[in-house]
Amino acid sequence: MKTLKTSVHITIYSLFITIITSSSSFANVTHYQTHFEKAKWNYSGDQYLCKIEHKVDGFGEFKLVAKPGSQLTVQLTADWLSLQDEHCPLSVQAPSWNQGNTPNSKGTLLKWSGNTGSSHESTNQFLEGLEQGLSWQAKVSDGLGNFYLVETAPIATQNIANQFKRCRQQLLPKPFSYVRRVDIPFESGSSKLVASHDADLNAIAQYVHVDNSIVSVLVDAHADASGEHLANLVLSKERADEVASRLIEFGIDRDKVQVRHHGARSPKVSNNTQAGRQSNRRVTIRLIKSPTKISAAQQAGGSYEPL
């Protein structure tokens, strides 16, 4: 009987300690969420960038960003907290009045650098969550025993999600960092373009079409050193003309295209190996921007990428 009483006392004591510990931990958790009457989602976008933002009063801002040729990025920016190499979970949650609609989602981890935590992995579900009227919830730890529960307000999210999706469909295929210099490879002795080249050539043309700061498209053709000098010069000209013609077919103004052919005079690497010769059989396309037009576009608020 005494043993039983002792066991009961130990159980009650353990439960008491658990409650005290839980209460103490909970006291270190601060919940941030903008009041519904003030909550707002903002959308902005063009062919260079699509973005939606949601301010969380007292903490910072959530963002979902799409760029040409890149995965979706979800971010949480803090107004006052700075972390380095910390990770925190971000998930999609049903609002308190609709717990039966809890999504089956593994979420993602935000990696912090300074005042911003971001992730490029498992991010599509956050756009889907907005379509379904769900909220995003981040659990942030400052490493000092303080925890912050940061949550979006699921208010008027469907329209914002639809605007963002339409914007993504109109994004350029590739960013300027990719199309500013592209090498088109060729088979030995051939000047024939193949289907796989069209993706890059079309991406270049689409970028030139929307960015009026592009003043020149330089097309420089090369050959390896395996043939006669004159034959290589002729072959490189055929390659240059073929690429220039395809760019014009894709809509680039003929006056912007400047064509040059170099034969084997300007190898990229040594011609002493098969791999080297393969690298040297190429046409290099470079996009040249006008600094004056870039400056004017920036003053007008345009979304132009730097050189």
Image: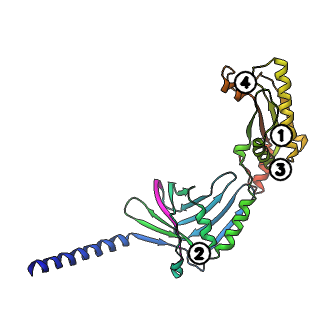
Q: CA distance from mark 2 to mark 3?
A: 38 Å
Residue 74 placement: quadrant: bottom right
Q: Which residue is mark 1?
A: 216
Q: Earlier in the sequence, mark 4 or mark 1?
A: 1
Residue 93 x, y percent position in the rendering: 52, 72
Magenta residues span 83-95
Main SS of the magenta part reads: strand
Q: Earlier in the sequence, mark 1 or mark 3?
A: 3
Q: Which amino acid is tagged 4?
A: Pro
Whether the residues at callouts 2 and 3 have beta carbons within 8 Å, the answer is no
Whether the residues at callouts 1 and 3 have beta carbons within 8 Å, the answer is no
Q: Which element type, helix, strand or loop, lies under badge 3? A: helix
Q: Which element type, helix, strand or loop, lies under badge 1? A: strand
Q: Which amino acid is tagged 3?
A: His
Taking the view exactly as shown, the residue that stands out farthest to the top is 228
Specify the label residue 267 is tagged with.
4
